[in-house]
Image: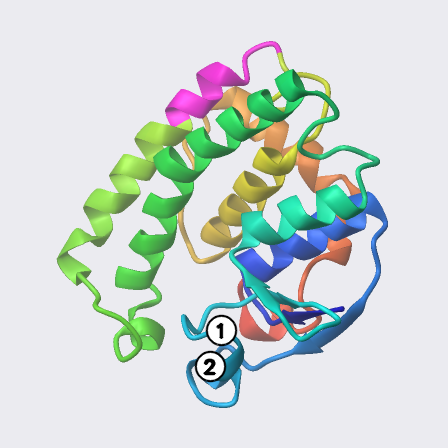
Amino acid sequence: MKLLSSFGPNPRMVLMFMAEKNITMAIENHDILGGENRREPYLKKNPTGQIPCLELDNGQVISETVAICEYLEELHPTPALIGATPVERAEARMALRRVELNVCEYFYNSFRFGAGLPLFKDRMRCLPEASAGLNAKGMDGLALVDTLLQGKRFLCGERLTIGDIVLYCCLDFYVSTGAKIDPALKNVQAWMARVNDRPSANSSLSANWREIGMRG
């Protein structure tokens, strides 16, 4: 089994998830900035052209970051980053859904249609006029997250879960592209610093992130 990886917040998310679980495996890096993932032979493994992917021993490929993490959690249930009980798993998936739909998707598309437009304009349909509005929607979602973090160390209380990792990798990347988080969001700021102090936050960064100039 090996992880098909690259620079970027989504590959970093899976690597951070693996680091928290102390999972090691072979990693095959691809040049996402050069568009290697949008050409053959990569497209034979994942026709969507997205990275990362998990290639199993039998050659089957699993894509989509959360699906990869769900699979790894089943193989390595301890420590639980989704949950050890039905209630814990429901709670973690609820938190994950909230941050994905209210924050991450808006911020990622705001980047693709804004600061990242030179990279994405020939790879997907881009809506440059939507970038500012998407950023505003993501900030609204982040304000909601700030209220949900009140009195908590992490999204699900005292335990770090997949939602924290997904949100952290998104925000750390987005801020490195020039975005600003409202300093009034004190709970988000404290949570961000808390996650940033974890060893997995540093070890999951791409080796060339400084050269690229973005945290992914």
User: Which residue does the image show at 75% across and 25% down from the upper left?
Assistant: 84
Looking at the rendered structure, which numbered label has been put on residue 28? Answer: none
Relative to 182, residue 115 above or below? below
Q: Which residue is mark 1?
A: 46
Q: Residue 195, can we see it? A: yes
Cβ–Cβ under 8 Å for marks 1 and 2: yes
The amino acid type found where label 1 is placed reads Asn
Left or right for 132, reference 1: left
Q: Residue at x 54, y 68 (%)?
A: 213
Label 2 Cα crowd, 10 Å radius (few <14 / some 14-19 / many 20+)? some
Find disc 2 in the rendering and name its residue.
43
Q: Is residue 149 magenta?
A: yes
The chief SS type of the magenta part is helix
Residue 96 in the magenta stretch? The answer is no
Q: In the image, residue 47 lies at what x, y percent?
A: 42, 75
At which x and y percent is residue 24?
84, 60
Question: In the depicted view, which residue is nearer to us: 178 or 11?
Answer: 11
- Considering only vertical position in the picture, is 169 above or below 127? above
Where the C terminus falls, by quadrant? bottom right
Q: Position of residue 32 (x, y in %)?
A: 51, 77
Q: Quadrant of residue 90?
A: top right
